C-alpha cells in the first residue's frame, strides 16, 4: 500500500520560512564579508569582489562632484551674502563712506570716489579686496573744517580712528553675511540642515583664512604710493577756495585742461591719505617730452603748471615732427606757460627749431653741455646729434648718441671742477643720457614714448618720459592711441635731491581716462639707509642728507 506524503498546511509552511530567515541573513552577511576581504587582499575572484570594486570606482567621482558642489555653494552663498548685507556705512572725517569686502584675485584696497574715479592701494595680497565708497561730502562736517581751520591738524588722527572703527564693524558684519548667505543657499540646494550648517561653517573658515592672509601680507607703506584713475569727462570741478568746494561740489566743467587740474587737485586734497606732501620750499619740475606738434599739450602743460605750482618745465625734445620753419609758430605758447621752459633738441627738432626757441621769452635752450641755473637748479644738456624726421635710423646712430653723451659727461666734469656742479643733465635719447652716469644726481630723457625710472650703475637716476603729445598724429596709426604722459619731480631746494615724483597718464586720442601715481625713491622709504653720494659731492638720487627728515607721511 503506497504512502501518500502529507500535504503541508499553508500556515505551517509560512512559519518555517519565518524561522529560517535569520539563518539566511547570516549567510548573506558572511558572503559579503568574504567578498570585501578578497577585494582588500587582491585575492582572486569573485563576483562579489568585482562588484565591490566597480561600486568604489563609481562612488569616487560622486564624492568629488559632491565636494565641488559644496565649494560652489559656499563661494556663491558667501558672495551673495556680502552683496546683500556685507557693507557698513561709516563717517570718515568730513565724508560719508560705505565699506565692504569683495572677492578678488590680487587683493588690495580700492577707494571709489564716484563719479570721479578711484584710488588704488597695494595694501595686501589675499582673495578679498577692501572697497571704500566715498558717498558724499557732509556739508556740516566739511563746513566746520572751513570755519575752524585749526581742526585740520587733528584730521588725520580722526580719519585713522574712523577707519579703524569701520574696519572692525565690517569684519563682524562680513562674518555674519557670509555665514548667512552660505547657510541659506546650502539649505535651498541640499534641503538638509546638517549640510547647510556645514556650508556656513566653511564660509566662515574661508573668510577667516582670507583675513589671516591679508594680515600677514599687510603693507602699510602702500599709502605712500597711491594710484588715482577715473573719467575726466565726469569729474566735478573743485573750484575756488575751501568753502566753495563744499558748496559747489557738484559743479561740472567741460574743458580738458581744467578737468586735469580738478582731478589732480582731488588726488592731492580730497583723498585724505597720508601721502608725501611737498613743503613750500620744494622745487617742482614738470618733465615733458615728445610733444610732436600736439596743440592740446600746451593746455595740459599750462594746467599742470598752475595746479602743482611748477617752478620749471623741462622738455627733453621732439617738440616738433618735421622741424620745418612752417612749424615754428607752434612754439609760441611757450612764452605764456607760467614757468621757465628748459629745452633740448630731439631728433625731430631741427637747428631752425632751436634758433626760433632761443628767441622766445621764457625759453632756455641747452646744448653742447652749456650749464644754466634756472629756478634754483643747475641744468646742462646736449641736443640730439641726429635729425631724422623721416624716422630713419642712419648707420652709426647709436655711436653718435654715445659720443654726444660723452661730450656732455666731460662738460659736467668741467662744471664740477669749477665749483658749479650740475644738478640735472638733459638729453633726448636715453643712450646719450646713460653716458653721464656718476657725473650728476639726475638725468632726464625721452624718445622712447614710454616712461621709466632707474638708478644706473654709478648712482645717477635716469628718468625717461613718455610722450606728452600722445605721439602726435601717429596716435591714429595704431589700433590703440598712445597715452599722454608727463611727470612732476619734487626736489629739495637745499640738497637738490629727488624726494618723490608723480606719474601723470591721460588717455590718448578719443579717450578720457586719467591716472596719477605717486612714487618715492627706495632711499626715502621709512627705515631706509642713505646711499653713497654721486662723485662731485652731491647726494645720490633720492638719498637723505644727514639731519634732513625723510619725506614720509606726516
Image (tube, rainbow, N blue to C red):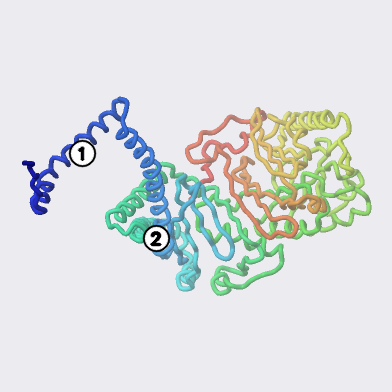
Which mark identifies residue 9? none
Q: Relative to residue 81, is residue 551 drawn left or right? A: right
* Residue at the farthest left position: 1
Q: Relative to residue 468, is residue 117 drawn left or right? A: left
Which residue is at a point 67% across and 41% down the rendered structure image? 452
User: Counting residues from the N terminus, which is met first, the one under dot 1 or under dot 2?
Assistant: 1
Which residue is at a point 81% across and 37% down the rendered structure image? 382
* Residue at the farthest right position: 325
Query: Which residue is label 2 attached to?
Result: 81
Q: CA distance from mark 1 to mark 2?
A: 51 Å
Depth order, front residue of 400/404:
400
- Quadrant of the drawing holding the N terminus: top left
Where is residue 164? Give x, y as percent: 38, 56
For disc 2, the neighbor class at 10 Å (few under 14, some 14 to 19, many from 20) is: many
Where is residue 477? Give x, y as percent: 81, 51
Residue 29 occupies quadrant = top left
Amino acid at each position: 500500500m503506497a504512502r501518500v506524503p502529507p500535504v503541508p498546511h499553508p500556515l505551517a509552511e509560512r512559519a518555517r520560512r519565518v524561522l529560517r530567515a535569520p539563518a539566511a541573513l547570516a549567510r548573506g552577511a558572511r558572503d559579503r564579508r568574504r567578498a570585501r576581504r578578497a577585494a582588500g587582499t587582491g585575492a582572486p575572484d569573485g563576483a562579489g569582489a568585482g562588484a565591490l570594486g566597480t561600486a568604489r570606482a563609481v562612488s569616487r567621482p560622486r564624492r568629488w562632484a559632491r565636494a565641488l558642489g559644496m565649494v560652489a555653494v559656499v563661494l556663491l552663498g558667501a558672495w551673495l551674502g556680502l552683496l546683500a548685507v556685507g557693507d557698513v556705512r561709516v563717517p570718515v572725517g568730513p565724508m560719508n563712506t560705505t565699506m565692504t569686502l569683495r572677492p578678488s584675485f590680487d587683493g588690495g584696497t580700492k577707494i571709489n570716489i564716484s563719479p570721479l574715479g578711484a584710488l588704488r592701494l597695494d595694501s595686501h595680497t589675499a582673495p578679498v579686496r577692501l572697497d571704500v565708497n566715498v558717498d558724499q561730502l557732509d556739508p556740516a562736517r566739511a563746513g566746520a573744517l572751513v570755519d575752524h581751520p585749526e581742526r585740520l591738524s587733528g584730521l588725520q588722527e580722526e580719519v585713522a580712528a574712523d577707519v579703524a572703527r569701520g574696519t572692525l564693524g565690517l569684519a563682524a558684519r562680513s562674518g555674519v553675511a557670509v555665514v548667512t548667505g552660505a547657510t541659506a543657499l546650502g539649505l535651498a540646494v541640499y534641503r538638509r540642515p546638517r549640510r547647510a550648517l556645514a556650508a556656513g561653517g566653511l564660509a566662515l573658515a574661508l573668510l577667516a583664512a582670507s583675513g589671516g592672509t591679508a594680515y600677514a601680507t599687510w603693507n602699510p607703506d602702500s599709502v605712500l604710493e597711491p594710484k588715482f584713475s577715473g573719467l575726466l569727462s565726469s569729474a566735478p570741478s573743485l573750484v575756488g577756495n575751501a568753502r566753495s568746494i563744499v558748496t559747489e561740489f557738484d559743479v561740472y566743467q567741460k574743458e580738458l585742461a581744467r578737468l586735469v587740474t580738478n582731478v589732480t587737485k582731488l588726488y592731492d586734497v580730497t583723498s585724505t591719505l597720508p601721502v608725501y606732501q611737498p613743503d613750500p620750499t620744494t622745487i617742482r619740475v614738470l618733465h615733458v617730452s615728445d610733444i610732436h606738434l600736439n596743440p592740446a599739450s600746451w593746455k595740459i602743460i599750462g594746467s599742470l603748471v598752475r595746479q602743482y605750482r611748477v617752478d620749471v618745465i623741462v622738455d627733453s625734445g621732439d617738440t616738433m615732427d618735421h622741424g620745418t620753419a612752417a612749424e615754428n609758430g607752434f612754439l609760441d605758447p611757450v612764452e605764456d606757460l607760467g614757468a621757465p621752459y628748459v629745452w633740448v633738441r630731439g631728433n625731430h627738432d631741427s637747428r631752425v627749431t632751436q634758433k626760433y626757441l632761443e628767441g622766445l621769452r621764457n625759453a632756455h635752450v641747452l646744448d653742447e653741455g652749456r650749464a644754466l641755473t634756472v629756478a634754483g637748479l643747475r641744468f646742462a644738456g646736449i641736443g640730439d646729434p641726429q635729425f631724422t624726421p623721416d624716422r630713419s635710423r642712419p648707420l652709426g646712430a647709436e655711436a653718435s648718441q654715445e659720443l654726444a653723451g660723452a661730450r656732455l659727461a666731460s662738460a659736467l666734469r668741467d662744471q664740477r671742477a669749477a665749483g658749479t656742479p650740475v644738478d640735472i643733465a638733459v638729453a633726448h635719447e636715453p643712450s646719450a643720457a646713460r653716458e653721464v652716469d656718476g657725473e650728476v644726481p639726475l638725468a632726464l630723457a625721452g624718445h622712447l614714448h614710454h616712461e621709466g625710472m632707474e638708478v644706473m650703475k654709478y648712482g645717477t637716476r635716469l628718468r625717461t618720459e613718455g610722450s606728452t603729445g600722445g605721439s602726435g598724429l601717429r596716435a591714429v596709426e595704431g589700433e590703440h592711441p598712445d597715452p599722454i604722459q608727463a611727470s612732476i619731480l619734487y626736489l629739495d631746494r637745499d640738497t637738490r635731491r629727488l624726494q618723490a615724483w608723480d606719474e601723470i597718464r591721460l588717455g590718448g586720442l578719443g579717450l578720457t581716462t586719467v591716472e596719477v601715481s605717486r612714487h618715492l625713491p627706495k632711499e626715502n622709504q621709512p627705515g631706509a639707509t642713505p646711499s653713497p653720494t654721486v662723485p662731485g659731492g652731491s647726494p645720490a638720487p633720492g638719498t637723505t642728507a644727514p639731519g634732513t627728515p625723510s619725506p614720509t607721511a606726516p
